[in-house]
Amino acid sequence: MSIDSIPLDDPETFQLLCSGNTMGIFQLESEGMRQVLRKLKPTEFEDIVAVNALYRPGPSQFIDQYIRRKHGLEKVVYPHPDLAPILRPTYGVLVYQEQIMQIAVQMAGYTLGKADILRRAVGKKKRELLEAQKKTFISGCMACHYSEKTAHQLFDLIVRFANYGFNRSHAVAYSFLSYRLAYLKAHVPQSFMAAHLTGIIGNQEKMEATLRELRDQGIRLLPPSINESVASFEPSGQAIRFGLSGIKNVGIGAIESLIEERTKHGSFKNLYDFCRRVPARKVNRKAIESMIFAGAFDLFGVDRAGLLATLDQALRLGEEQQKQGEGQTSFLIPEHDEEIYIDVPPLTAEEKMHYEHEALGLFLSAHPIEEYRDALPRSVLTVRETERLPEGNDAVLAVMVEQVKRIRTKSGQPMAFFSASDESGLIDTVCFPNTYEKIEQWINNGQMLVLQAKKSSGKQNNPQLILQRALSLKDYLDERDTALFLRIDQAHHQTQLLEKVKRAIETAPGLHRVILYYEANKRTVALGLNYAVQINESLVRSMRSLLGEQNVMAKRMMGNGAARKPRKDDQRFS
């Protein structure tokens, strides 16, 4: 396949563009652009050109107009009937700087040279240049038998357009790249995504997003392997093999030495064989350790803990045998008949995931949250499900905290940004000062939390969360079905007292519901999630001081959300 042989009317390519599945495609991969493509549903190359020109801060207001007119939802209107040939390809929307030049030629009798001077003058926005061009343009229009009013309207339109005008020549060049990449992604997805992964090594956020897209497409990302991997990510059948350059502490020199030895003398048979054949001066202990953590030695069927415990011994034996082999024509050294690995307890699943994440920058074999998913109620959403919610909706998620960044506002108040991840992906999260001061102790890398947050949009319209409440995942699971029941008897049914109860609730935000029972009219009210609390001894003591000892109780809810009859073990606080 050559670049020039890629057709510009390929149905599979436009189907991919319509789906917004444009991760890794030049100019089209931001979340905002993907949303535009889903609404636009491009059917021809010119649609891609127009979107590339319009999707910028100034002209983005015209994108919806372009889309409505393309789909026949709004009538195409031209500033003047004679402009139809110029603006018809963009549905009457002025998109390109070249259209300014065409308008000047058509309506004011400009030459292309004079029209380019007008284009540059409008772009520079210098008053004296504009005034001179305005006089020339209006007199030119009138000489071509257009009214002075029409001439003024057209010139004003051109000046307004200067705030967002984009070169069509640039947009076309960008769009050729965008379209051709989309074609490759549609027709050779494994090869495309492998190249994309190689290009984003070191960018955790993009790697996480790409891994999620691979799952959606049903493309497996195979772990790194010292016998299968090369430096880059590469297609492997219907899957993709993780590249060795994606492992931390493994440099290109070490990778080249490993591959050279493997190419000359065949696959490595075990850890000892590797250490015999690859000198430690080329692939040092830290690099081998990182590859073990990443799973590159898993093919030998030995637990990673055993490999790590045996590494020093294998390196020592390898070094001794390399010294013995110096000067020999063949580098192959006779090997021991048996492999002896030091017997140590295997890594726990949590340890395995932790060290794998350290080596790769992402969770490849599993994510720590997966272990708890079956124990969580369906109301606890995944990151992916939350991203699909309308903006402004509240969500409860179980996540791991990553990439914490703490800052201070201009007024000196502390706040934080972090990434919240689970097995479905990763989402930016903002913790403003009023929330941060209440849950600061939970905002640490590696901490597993249950969050209540509001779905919002961040940079480039990418989804983000505004954190409202947080609770450690362990505490949540221990008490997930527990609610705080408050009985309001007649003696305590006072407006001022109930205001104090409300303030006490607001000072202990959490994820446990509060249920009020009004004794006077036998009415039960479940407060909304915005009044959920963290049940602890301090809160219960405060409530009992306000409402009475017997009127405050923590109870477990039944499966349908109703409270079951109190039991002795409900009296958790005394």
Image: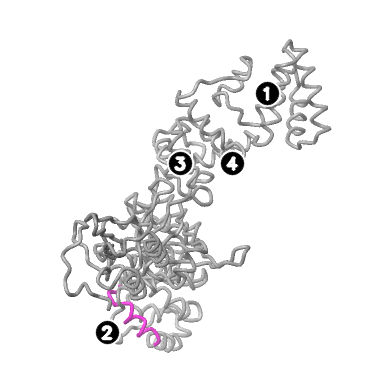
Query: Magenta part mainly helix, strand or loop?
Result: helix
For the residues labelled 4 and 1, the Cα–Cα distance comes to: 23 Å
Neighbor class of circle 1 (other Cα within 10 Å; few <14, some 14-19, many 20+) is many
Residue 536 seen from this side: yes
The question of residue 551 being in magenta is answered with no
- Using the image as rendered, state which of residue 300 and residue 151 is in the foreground: 151
Q: Nearer the viewer, residue 253 or 296?
A: 296
Point out residue 195 in the picture as x, y percentages from the top left corner.
46, 54
Residue 338: which numbered mark, if any?
2
Per the image, label 1 sits on a secondary structure element best described as: helix
How many discs mark residues in the rendered view? 4
The answer for how far apart the CA atoms under marks 4 and 2 are is 65 Å
Is residue 310 on the magenta stretch?
Answer: yes
SS state under label 2? loop
Mark before the other along the chain sequence, 2 or 3 = 3
Which amino acid type is shown beneath numbered disc 2?
Glu
Amino acid at pointer 4: Arg
Query: Could you say which is closer to the camera, residue 115 or residue 343?
Result: 115
Please give the residue where the numbered disc 1 appears in the rendered image.
102
Amino acid type, callout 3? Gln
Give the mark, 4 or 1, whose residue is nearer the N terminus. Answer: 4
Q: Disc 1 vs disc 2: which is toward the camera? A: 1
The residue indicated by pointer 4 is 56
- Specify the quadrant of the image occupied by residue 89: top right
Residue 468 is tagged as none
Disc ID at residue 35: 3
